[in-house]
Image (tube, rainbow, N blue to C red):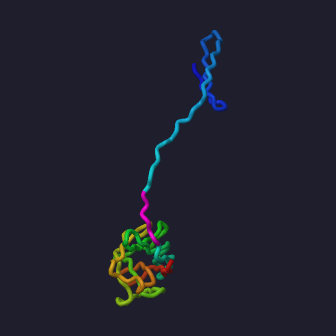
Amino acid sequence: MKLNKLAAGTIVSLVLFGSVGQLAINTQPASAAEVTQTTTVAVKPQSLISSGSFVTTEQDHPTNGIAQVVKVDGKRYIEFNKAFTTARGPKVRVILYRNNNVPVKLKAQDYVTIAPLKKFDGAQRYEIPANLDLKDFKSVAIWCEKFNVTFGYASLQNS
């Protein structure tokens, strides 16, 4: 039977020979394998343009999380963090609204639709059209087009 034991940087091997009771000790310096492999991860540079925390507008449709507008590779995006959550509903849209506070009911001239909401919770990203002037909009909102009800919004503060 062989027993291996690591003691003070030295490997000690004990070998017992049946009933004879002889003991053989072999000492060798322990060595660790060197790690020479490195991994490089490419990270796209992104700049934060503005951000805000969602507040619920319609109590029956709670909305939480953080929205931010970022620029990546020359394109602008609205991003929701992984803590984003909103109520379920039909025809729910991501919109940009002209003022800081978004009412429950909207007028067509006060907002622009960015895209249908992809999912009701979790991180997600929406591209902002290049021809849209962000200076004209102060908030991101989650809006139900079918019933003209704003679930929640985030006032955007410039970074």
Residue positioned 60% across, 28% down in the render: 29
Residue 101 drawn above or below residue 43: below
Image coordinates of residue 141 in percent, x first then y, are 43, 80
| Magenta stretch secondary structure, dominant | loop
Residue 147 shows in the view:
no
Residue 159 to residue 7: above or below:
below
**In terms of depth relative to the viewer, which is nearer, 141 or 130?**
130
Q: Residue 81's spot in the image, x, y percent?
A: 47, 68
| Residue 84 seen | yes
Using the rendered view, name the quadrant where residue 130 is placed: bottom left
74 lies left or right of 17: left
Left or right of 99, for residue 12: right
Residue drawn at point x = 42 percent, y = 58 percent: 42
Taking depth in this image into account, of 139 and 146 the one nearest to the observer is 139
Residue projecting furthest to the right: 8
The residue sitting at the top extreme is: 20
Image point (47%, 66%), residue name: 82
In the picture shown, does residue 106 fall above or below 72? below
Residue 136: horizontal and vertical position, in percent? 41, 86
Q: Is residue 100 found left or right of 109 in the rendered image?
A: right
Find the magenta span and give its range: 42-47
Instruction: Examine the structure image and report whether residue 64 is included in the region drawn in magenta.
Output: no
Which quadrant of the rendered structure holds the N terminus?
top right
Magenta stretch contains residue 45: yes
Give the percent coordinates (x, y) of residue 28: 60, 25
